[in-house]
Amino acid sequence: MGLGQGISTYAHAPSQPSSAAAPRIAANVYLTDPGAVQSMVDLVRAEIRPIDIPVNNAGSCPPVPWQDTDEAAWNYSLDVNLTARCPPCHAVTPGLIQRRWELIVDIGSVNARAGRTHLVAYSTAKAGLLGLTRSLAGELGPYGVCVNMVMPGSSPPRQRTPDPARRPAAARGPATSPPAVLLPPTRASVCVVGDFLHARQGPICVPAPA
């Protein structure tokens, strides 16, 4: 992944039957470039519809020992994991405020609260993202826009025994669980503002707005 680069995809098809494929747009965008991000948002609006639930998911976490974390490594981590979230939020904010019932989801990390060795810059950026999420929630909440964070974490190591049949049930089966996070865009769910949710295992699912 290049500096600030991310693949952004948006799909929405409220009028189509469930068996039909939803329209999609994939855009290769440098998220630290406000002009490129605005062009992406304009393209989605023109080709499909305005964005209702933007999910800030781009990131990178190469392990670097603290002694080797020079200025370039530090700036890279903050640019990709924190600064790159600002242009997308800026680009979609006017439309979200206009519709007055929308949701911004930031994908953070448990390292924002716990920290981790060899990921000092990454953990610092994620802690900053938590501050951004809560601050934006305070500013945009009065307009009906909720801003929350999902904080994925690594799965605990599986117990190894000679006989697979004797393993605990939680230690058997596929490596990933069913979707760990479901954020339905209902009036009740958007009462949660500026909060974070830990997701220890499994994919994260955010459905298209109904």
Image (cartoon, helix red, strand yellow):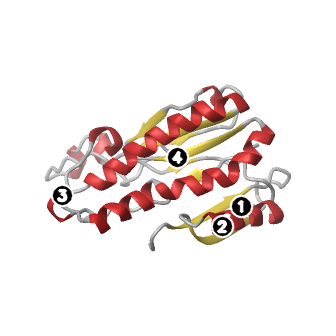
Give the residue type that dot 3 points to.
Answer: Trp
Q: Which residue is mark 2?
A: 35
Give the residue type that dot 4 points to.
Answer: Asp
Residue under the point 75% across and 55% down:
12
163 vs 206, nearest the viewer: 206
Q: Nearer the viewer, mark 4 or mark 3?
A: 3
Residue 119 place in picture, x, y as percent: 26, 55
Q: CA distance from mark 2 to mark 3?
A: 34 Å
Secondary structure of the residue carrying tag 1 is helix
Give the residue type that dot 1 points to.
Answer: Val
Q: Which of disc 1 and disc 2 is earlier in sequence?
A: 2
Checking the image for residue 106, the label placed there is 4
Q: Nearer the viewer, mark 2 or mark 1?
A: 2
Tell me whether circle 2 and circle 1 mark residues in contact (CB < 8 Å): no
Q: CA distance from mark 1 to mark 3?
A: 37 Å
Q: CA distance from mark 4 to mark 1?
A: 17 Å
46 vs 30, nearest the viewer: 30
Crowd around label 1: few <14 · some 14–19 · many ≥20 (10 Å):
many
Q: CA distance from mark 2 to mark 1?
A: 10 Å
Checking the image for residue 66, the label placed there is 3
Q: With 206 as the anchor, is 1 left or right in this view?
A: left
Q: Nearer the viewer, mark 4 or mark 2?
A: 2
Residue 153 visible within the image: yes
Q: Which of disc 3 and disc 2 is earlier in sequence?
A: 2
Crowd around label 3: few <14 · some 14–19 · many ≥20 (10 Å):
few
Residue under the point 58% across and 67% down:
33
Q: Which of disc 3 and disc 4 is earlier in sequence?
A: 3
Secondary structure of the residue carrying tag 3 is helix
Q: CA distance from mark 4 to mark 2?
A: 21 Å
Q: Which residue is mark 1?
A: 41
